[in-house]
Amino acid sequence: MARKSNNTSTFESTRRRKSLGEDEVFSAEDQARFEAMRSEDFDEGPVDDGPPTGDRWSTWDDSEALQRGPKPWPEWIITDLGAVDYELGVLKTGKEADVFLIERAVPDTDRAVLMASKRYRSAEHTQFNRAGDYTAGRTARRSRDRRAMEKRTKFGLEQAAGRWAATEFDALKRLYVAGVAVPYPVQILGTEVIMEFIGTGRTAAPRLAETRPDEAELESLWEQACENLRLMAEQGFAHGDLSSYNTVVHEGRLVVLDLPQIVDIYANPKGLEFLTRDVENLGGWFTARGVDRQEVDDLRVELMALAGLR
């Protein structure tokens, strides 16, 4: 809001004295002085401090230490305070978030990197209707937040969106460190999670469902799928929604995506059910292309043993 300084009262006082008949003349010099006071004493509103190029300054420095990816940071991470972000378009729309392609670059240099920016919608705009199944066993640290989310107040809806983002970021960090093939989590800020872009050039890697592997490639991808599931089970997690549509293949490597609904198989009453469903959903794609059904059954039994559920 504009602020008026006390200097304006000087002019008002002069104007009142003239109306009482005092022998003062409001000269051109007075007018110029008054206009100068007006320009100095009123706020001009917020100053646009956006970057000279790009769509926004890099948000790297806005994230705190725990809101950044695990160290050692990959060499491609750009931490320069003078870096800028460019919006390059939408990669994917989803039930609870949309994923954008961004480029973070240092102006006047050749240093630039493509990343994926996942931005969660507020809970009142999400199309994700089965959230309760996935969040069973999770608790908000503050009772105020828990009550607000249960009552679906505006504050509660904002908290819910932030929790989805935070859950995915934390899962990416933990699974990345454990060796699971997931995108490197760069940073989180509010409801935006920035992560490694998996693709070639500006083209995202194809989903597993879109690939047509030969026999040798199929065997390699199945082995990778099994290993990723083993590592997740050892950490006590089930993906919760694993399928050929949220795994991608890049240069022969199977990468797991979309982790906001990750399930703690011990805390969630349906943990075993989610673990079994992950195996069945992903395994079904492989058996339809030649993998022996017995391998899928054996994997399910193995994962239950690794998780200590049998």
Image (spheres, rainbow, N blue to C red):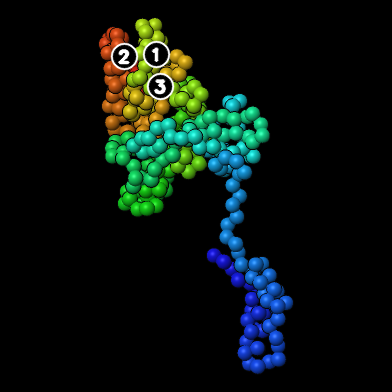
As measured in the structure, the alpha-carbon distance from the residue carrying label 3 to the one carrying label 2 is 16 Å
Measured as percent of width and height from the top left, residue 139 is found at 37, 42
Q: Determine whether label 3 and label 2 are within 8 Å by CB.
A: no
Q: Which mark is residue 221?
A: 1
Residue plotted at (46% across, 35% down): 89
In this orientation, which residue lies closer to the viewer: 255 or 51?
A: 51
Viewer can see residue 254: yes
What type is the residue that disc 3 sits on? Answer: Pro
Image side of residue 115 versus residue 33, left or right: left
Q: Is residue 233 visible?
A: no
Quarter of the image that includes the C terminus: top left
Q: Is residue 45 depicted above or below 34 in this figure?
A: above
User: Residue under circle 2?
Assistant: 286
The picture quadrant where one finds residue 209 is top left
Going 44% across and 25% down the picture, which residue do you hit? 204
**Gap between marks 1 and 3 measured at Cα:** 14 Å
Give the residue at x 28% y 17%.
Answer: 284
Task: Tell me the crowding category of disc 3: few under 14, some 14 to 19, or many 20 or more residues within 10 angstroms, Cα based.
Answer: some
- Residue 19 to residue 290: above or below: below
Label 3 or label 2, whichever lies nearer to me, is: 3
Identify the residue at image location x=65%, y=79%. 11
Quick check: 85 left or right of 285? Answer: right
Label 1 Cα neighbours within 10 Å, binned few <14 / some 14-19 / many ≥20: some
Instruction: Identify the mark nearer the N-term, 2 or 1.
Output: 1
- Percent across and percent down for residue 13 are 65, 84
User: Decide: marks 2, 1 in contact (CB < 8 A)?
Assistant: yes
- Mark 3 — residue? 206
Q: Amino acid at mark 2?
A: Phe
Going by the numbered disc 1, the residue's amino acid type is Leu
How far apart are the two marked residues, 2 and 1, measured between alpha carbons?
9 Å
* Secondary element at tag 2: helix
Which x, y percent locates residue 45? 57, 60
